[in-house]
Amino acid sequence: MIMKKAFTLLELIFVIVVIGIIAAAIIPRMKNNSLQQAAIQIESHIRYTQHLAMVDDKYDDSDSNWFKKRWQIIFAKQANTDQQWAYTIFSDIVGGNSGKPNKTEIAINPMNHNQRMTGGYNSAQELNVSSSNFVGMQSMNIGKKYGVADMNFSCSQRLVFDYLGRPMKSDLSGNSKPYKENDLITDTCKITLKNESESVVIEINKQTGFIKSTF
C-alpha cells in the first residue's frame, strides 16, 4: 500500500513565513526607483555623447579651432531648467565657440527628430523647460522627471570626449590647441545623484570612458 504524503499545518505555516520574508526582501527592489532610473538614463546619454565624439570626429586642418567642436555633455541648474538639475548634449559648432549651446548645436533625439537632447538651457524660450515652445526632452530635466535634488561632481560639470572616446574635463572654448596639460581627466570622474533619502554614484573611467553606476 502506497502512502500519500501531505503537508502538516506547521509545515504550511513555515512555507508561508519563508515566502513572506523573501517577498519583503525582493518586492521593494522591484519597485521603480527613480534615482536609479535617472542614473541609468544618464549613463546611456554619456555613452551616446562618447559615441558621437568617436563617429563624428571634428578634425579639420583648415580650421584652427576644430577641437572646440568636440561633442560634450554639460550638467546645469539654472532659470531655463526651472532651477532643477538637467543636462544637454551638444557640439560647439557655431562661430565663436562660446561653450554655451544654442538650439542648432544640440544633438537631435535619434528617437524623435523633432526634439533636441536637452533638459533646458540658456535664455531661448525654445530651450526653456517650462515653455510651451520647448523643443527639448522633459526626461533630461532629471530634477523634474526623477526628483534628483542635488548633484556632486568630482570632476567638471562638463564632460568632453575626444575621437578615441577619452573624457576631457575642461571647457574647450578658451583653449588654443587640441590638447593642453591635464585636459584629459586624471582620475575616475564621479557624479553623485541625490534625493531626500538615497544617492547613486556614476563613475567614468579616466582612460577608457567606461561608465558604471553604484546603487
Image (cartoon, rainbow, N blue to C red):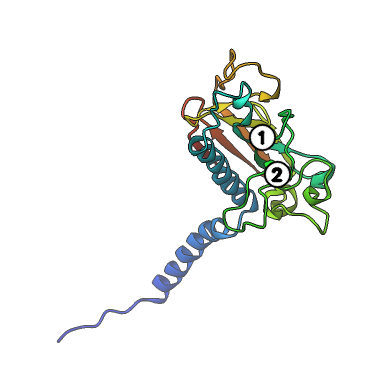
Considering every residue shown, the one lying at the far bottom of the view is 1
Q: Residues within 10 Å of mark 2 (few under 14, many from 20)?
A: few
Residue 215 visible? The answer is: no
Quadrant containing the C terminus in the rendered view: top right
Image-based side of 188 in relation to 93, left or right: left
Residue at image mark 2: 104
Q: Residue at x 56, y 48 (%)?
A: 40
Measuring from the top left, give residue 176's x and y in whole percent: 65, 16
Q: Secondary structure at mark 1?
A: loop
Q: Looking at the rendering, which quadrant does residue 74 occupy?
A: top right
Q: Residue at x 54, y 61 (%)?
A: 27
Q: Residues within 10 Å of mark 1 (few under 14, many from 20)?
A: many
Count of numbered circles on the image: 2
Q: Is residue 167 above or below residue 47?
A: above
Q: Which mark is residue 93?
A: 1
Q: Residue at x 57, y 22 (%)?
A: 185
Q: Secondary structure at mark 2?
A: helix
Measuring from the top left, give residue 214's x and y in whole percent: 54, 39
Residue 177 visible? The answer is: yes
Measuring from the top left, give residue 189's x and y in whole percent: 58, 28
CA gap, disc 2 to disc 1?
A: 9 Å
Image-based side of 24 in relation to 93, left or right: left
Considering every residue shown, the one lying at the far left of the view is 1
Q: Is residue 137 above or below residue 90?
A: below
Considering every residue shown, the one lying at the far top of the view is 181
Disc 2 and disc 1 in contact, CB within 8 angstroms: yes
Closer to us: 66 or 5: 66
Considering every residue shown, the one lying at the far front of the view is 62
Q: Looking at the rendering, which quadrant does residue 131 occupy?
A: bottom right
